[in-house]
Image (cartoon, rainbow, N blue to C red):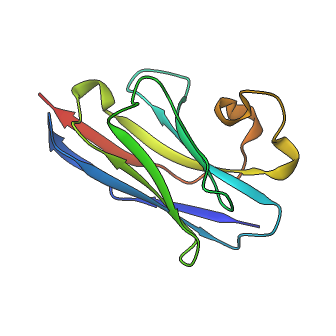
Amino acid sequence: QVQLVESGGGVVQTGDSLTLSCAASGRTSSSFAIGWFRQAPGKKERAFVATISWNEGNTYIADSVKGRFTISRDNTLNTVYLQMNNLKPEDTAVYFCAEMSYAMVFGSTWYSDIHRYDHWGQGTQVTVSS
């Protein structure tokens, strides 16, 4: 089964940029997309950030980060990137990537439904200081 490893987190200042990576090993033909979610300090829920499909490269970005964050992938490296620009203190969170299989892709907002994702990574901490 697929294993996901996030990297690239760190401590930055407001306005800085960071690029997170999600390396997927053991990826199978049933893997459709990789999504990024984040869990802010003190929050129980993980919030949708962005998703990209492996084959078509279609992207979906949360309104809260649209215009600042972009998602991309390198199929040869089985890696998905989250480029985060103009970071704000409210972006402080643990960022997780997760895999969605083809079977879970239905309905209009499938990409933001956290319950449709499995095979989560361990997360990477992003801290934005003011």
Coordinates of residue 43 in the picture (x, y in percent):
47, 21
Q: Left of 76 or right of it: where is 40?
A: left
Q: Residue furthest right?
A: 103
Q: Residue furthest bottom?
A: 76
- Residue 30 vertical position relative to residue 50 in the rendered view, above or below: below
Location of residue 51 by image quarter: top right
Q: Residue at x 25, y 38 (%)?
A: 127
- Residue 46 vertical position relative to residue 80 in the rendered view, above or below: above
Coordinates of residue 32 in the picture (x, y in percent):
74, 55
Q: Left of 107 or right of it: where is 50?
A: left
Q: Quadrant of the N terminus?
A: bottom right
Q: Quadrant of the C terminus?
A: top left
Marker count (numbered): 0
Location of residue 114 by image quarter: top right
Q: Residue at x 64, y 65 (%)?
A: 3
Q: Residue at x 67, y 36 (%)?
A: 111
* Residue 78 or residue 70, whichever sits in front: 70
Coordinates of residue 39 in the picture (x, y in percent):
46, 31
* Residue 11 or residue 16, whichever sits in front: 16
Coordinates of residue 34 in the picture (x, y in percent):
62, 52
Q: Residue at x 57, y 54 (%)?
A: 121
